[in-house]
Image (tube, helix red, strand yellow):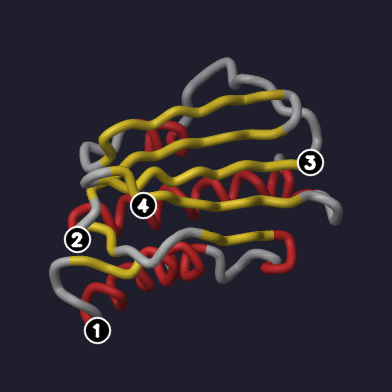
Amino acid sequence: MNALAKANELLRYGVLAACDMEELVTGSFAPFAREQITVQGPKCCVAKDACTPLVMALHELGTNAKKYGALSRPEGHVEISWEIMDDQIKVSWCESGGPPVSTPTRKGLGTRLITQQSQFRAVSLDFSSAGLTCQISIAATG
């Protein structure tokens, strides 16, 4: 709920047409150990209709990393980065140093929350034994 409140705050107090990508990403991780998370990317804004879905997806990834992935171990690490490509932002989530992961046998609510957002242009999840990698493409603003 805090992640969703942060998205709404960004929209209410920021530019109504968009929200700042770095603020959105860092706001998604308030409940997690910041020393285990690296955030990097150029200054850019996320289109308004993609802000809340992106916060929810990042928070879901963070929650799962805390329970089962890289953030469940002190030596684990998550890198969130993004790049601007034409009119979209490509967001990358990469876990390392956590327990081995494998592709889930079923798609739960969290996976559907990430993969079935109509505001996302593309989503990929790679359950490598080295750690989960997720790529999400969303609309950017000018």
Number of residues whose C-alpha sits closer than 10 Å to that of mark 1, classed few (under 14), some (14–19) or many (20 or more) = few
Q: Find residue 141 and report its horizontal and vertical position in percent.
A: 19, 58
Report how far apart the C-alphas of labels 1 and 3 lie in the structure.
Answer: 37 Å
Q: Relative to residue 129, is residue 108 drawn left or right? A: left
Closer to the N terminus: mark 1 or mark 4?
Answer: 1
Mark 3 to mark 2 CA distance (whole Å): 33 Å
The residue pinned by badge 3 equals: 98
Earlier sequence position, callout 3 versus callout 2: 2
The residue singled out by tag 4 in the image is 54
- In this rendering, the count of numbered labels is 4
Q: Residue at x 38, y 31 (%)?
A: 123
Amino acid identity at mark 2: Lys
N-terminal label among 4 and 2: 2
Return the x and y of residue 68 as percentages of the image width and height: 71, 40
The residue carrying mark 2 is 48
* Side of 18 relative to 65 (left or right): left
Q: Where is residue 70 in the image (x, y as percent from the top left)?
A: 73, 45
Position of residue 51 relative to residue 22, above or below, is above
Rounded to the nearest angstrom, the CA distance separating label 1 from label 4 is 18 Å
Q: Residue 13 carries which label?
A: 1
